[in-house]
Image: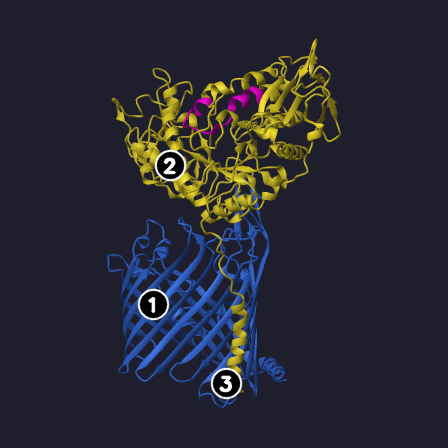
Amino acid sequence: MRISLALAGWLVCGTAAAETGSTGRFEFGSYGRVTTTSDGRGRTGRDSNIVAHGSRIDAPSYAELEFRREDQYSGGATSRVVATLALFPPFFHFSGKPQQQFGVRNLYATGSYGFFNIWAGSRMYRGDDIYLLSWWPLDNQNTVGGGFGFSIPSSIGNTHIAAQAGMLRLDSPNTYQSIPSVSPIGFGAISAISLDRPHTIESLKVTHTLTRSHIASLPERGGLKFIAYGELHQLAAGVKRDASLNYESSLPEDAGWMAGAEVGYWTGERDSHVSLFVRHARGLAAYDPLGVPTTFGNRHTTAGAHETLVALGANYEIGMFGVLFGGYARMFRDASPSFTSSEKFNEGNVVVRPQLYIAENWGLAIEGSYQARQTAYAAQNGRPGVAALVRGAIFPYFSPSGRGSFKRPQIGVIYAVSARNAAARELYAQDDVFAHRTFEHFVGVTAEWWFNSSTYP
Amino acid sequence: MKLSKVVGIALILALPGVACIEALDNSIKPLKRATLTDDWRDEVVYQLLVDRFANGDVNNDYQVVSGALARYQGGDWRGIINHFDYLTALGVTTIWISPVVRNVETDADVDAYHGYWSQDLTQTNPHFGDLATLRLLVKRAHESGIKVLLDVVANHMGQVFFYDMNMNGKPDEYIAGTGTISPVTRTTEWDPDFDPRGIQAQTSLGVAGRAPIIFINDPLINRIPPRPAIFASAAAYHAFGRVLSYDDPKQVLLADFPGGLKDLATELPQVRTALIDAYVQWVKLVDFDGFRLDTVKHVEHDFWRVFSKGVRDRLAAEGKTNFMLVGEAFDGDDALLGSYTRPGELDSVFYFSQHFQVFRDVFEYANDPTKRRGTDQIASLWSTKKGNYGTAPQPGGIGLPPYKALMNIIENHDRPRFLFESNGNLAALRNALTLLMTEEGIPCIYYGSEQEFSGGNDPANREVLWKTAFSTEGGTFRHIARLAKIRQQYIALRRGDTTVRWSSAHVGTESDAGIFAFERGGGDVGNQKVLVVMNVSESQQSATERPGLGLTTAFAPGTILVDVLSETPRQVTVDRGGELHMQLPPQSAAILVPQNQVM
């Protein structure tokens, strides 16, 4: 009933807003990290993670610039138009090249009235992350599409329901092909799109939030939330063609689904929180939609592939001390008939970062992590490999905005040393120094910030 | 709501994920090595090109060009694993698979789908699978009662280096000469013509000594320095260039094989050791049951003595005996073939002289009056076995004298298919298969014979088998399966000695034109005897008689013989004189067993 009233009000307010005008403002927000490091041996420092979600500490530079227009209309409706440019390294001062790689990550508009909101466009559509892993374990979509959501407040908690549908079509030979074709008029050739296989995703997310008003034992500003989340994936069929020889390969339609859940608890004090994630995906949904599956079942589909993961992220701060935690265990099985595919593996990563806050603006973080991947792939010695990497790091920093693990910006010095075992070294080509070195150093300076970003509120 | 209830809900949400966890497959443990063969004459060998037999995993279909037979087609070891039922239905007991080692990928738009362009003797060819899959293949084969022969190459590596003849540090192809005052010649530094001095460097002033050998690094086609490391040194190669004449013994032994396949200096002890080490290691890793040895006539005899002893001794120490060493000397010269079965060398060779003189001249040419030969040519060839081939088992070998264990072939991957050469003479093919499966030695069927493939020269004779949907309903498939069953039932057909009872030079309208008869029995099998009678005439019903003469058998007068090959009951009786008078339709055969011994 409250929803329909809200919707009716929103429909009415469209007229009212036109009559009475609006107030609005432009906003700028940003997320960024810029790091420059050495390996201590004369080369640049480099990410040495061996699992899908390694620790963030040696992550490469990356930045987003968000431009946003926000309006509030007198009838109660609001709107927001968001454009986010993402910048990828190398930057000009490093490479000397004026060309800069950037991507348009957000380009969408959203409107809301009361408990209802609707959006459409190109959007990073995300839930909660695990900071130390730089990862959104449950919902992290990057599509062009649209969605809506609405809230249902009640005495047993606040429920928010969000649905979305989007599409992406990667510029990959398996999803898109443009071939030269004889021009229908005159001479020569023109391009014809011969393969066009969009990947569509629909999702539904139900979030139920409890606060002290619902559970008396919760902290005053704390809360609990439960999230149930699911996705459906579809990939259209197509035919890939060798344009010169006219060989054709049929690419069948593909599909998948994912279901997952999250339980989160926060104290409301100094960003202390803990989040537990579980998800299971099958078929196409087991893969990152921005990646391209490289192995298939014999029908050239991902049917049979599956992924199961459990992840935990947490932060706790008290007085001069704080500790961040991130970890996950993931089982991935591709659809290939071979049981020794390199895409059948178990992996995991555990990262702990205790911190000492010195005075109000300084900090000293120490990080330890262990990551490993066991692959069902026989090395020539006949044994399955368990690639493992242990890392220790120290990160003293200056935090102008105050003490806390999530206060930004942070400007500091990083030193990390990683040790990889023989199986980890075998993941690299023989011409790569990583194939021959057990220890890897990563030393340099770094800055990270975020402010006023709608993606990282 | 209480906090404990909330935690309970969280656990319930987590459970579905936990329940989905499964262990990684652990079936890649090293295999136990075992000797599975008692007598290699009991085997029915099936030669298959891995790339062409079955595609069991599309994920290794790297650069497959479907339908272009000079390119990879996608077959792999997983495919073989999926089709052991097809092989056992055919009666196969041993498979001979393509080389397993990593190859140079491609050259001049022709791929190494066959496996003979070795680059790394220590790694598997990723087009076919990985070590675990290869192990699974052999494991499943052994569980199905099937042995596995591995194809190995000792003569050469792939096109892994070029001769820097003009010393400019890069591989060149050039044309020289004016065509008027000097001949126009084309030279490729990858594959120059044989030079008895060794390939020479050339400048405008003339020759400049042996051309430097340069190993190239082209990872895109895996043309990189070979392994083990000794094969990445110039000293490991003869470097005389490409063979021009197979009549020149020096070229046969020292020249590069066609295609720029670099000839190894197999006389060097360190090269010999490296080859023995590399190939023994595959048996230790995978438990193969024998080697098919490629291009043996291009390697000196002394190598084969050292190699054979080295392999046998090393494997015996691992508990693997009766390990078959069968060599391929692609030559019709019977004495040459036999030379590789001298004491201390190989257990067997492919019986190429029979392939040419019998299966080609007598069967393939049966419908060509200008080429066909009488069956006396079979008898004549067989009569030289004891003279040309080893008559004592090799020390530490398979326990059989080579002359009794020759590998008989109608087709292989280097010869046009029987049906191509015979203009589709299916009756002749089936009759030839009857001889193959009943004669002394070990029958070896080239994949696709059972599906009546008819491709011409390489690569047309390397068809894709899975396009047949692995049908077991075809007439030739059923004929082979029936012959294999009969061979299995009657030990005389596997282990018996041979006595030729009838052969004929007649190929026209004479009464016995095309008749050939031989008895199998005695020797290692005691009293059981089987008489095989065949008519290879293309046009007439012939008989086991000519004026004043009938077929004499070892069977007593009055013995009733039953044709166990015929699908309809057929009997003949040995007459009072001990002779057998029998008429056979064109291109047909009978396998005659005494009535009281029929199984």
Check disc 2 and report the residue beneath it: B276
Between tags 1 and 2, which lies in front? Answer: 2
**In the displayed structure image, the side of residue B391 where residue A31 appears, left or right:** left
Q: Chain of mark 3?
A: B
Q: Which mark is residue A379?
A: none
Q: Which residue is the extreme one toward the top?
A: B548
Q: Are marks 3 and 2 on the same chain?
A: yes
Image spot of residue B248 (x, y percent): 39, 18
Q: Residues within 10 Å of mark 1 (few under 14, many from 20)?
A: many
Q: Residues within 10 Å of mark 3 (few under 14, many from 20)?
A: few
Image spot of residue A301 (x, y percent): 56, 54
Colour chain A appears in: blue
Measured in 3D between alpha carbons, the distance from the residue under mark 3 to the one under mark 2, in whole angstroms, is 70 Å
Q: Callout 2, which amino acid?
A: Ile
Check disc 1 and report the residue beneath it: A57
Badge 1 marks a residue whose secondary structure is helix
Q: Residue at x 46, y 23 (%)?
A: B390
Check disc 3 and report the residue beneath it: B3
Image spot of residue B556 (x, y percent): 69, 20
Q: Earlier in the sequence, mark 3 or mark 2?
A: 3
**In the displayed structure image, the side of residue A369 where residue A6 appears, left or right:** right
Badge 2 marks a residue whose secondary structure is helix
- Could you say which is closer to the camera, residue B223 or residue A36? B223
- Span highlighted in magenta in the image: B337-360
Q: Callout 3, which amino acid?
A: Leu
Which quarter of the rendered picture does the N terminus of chain B lie within? bottom right
User: Which chain is assigned yellow?
Assistant: B
Q: Chain of mark 2?
A: B
Q: Callout 1, which amino acid?
A: Ile
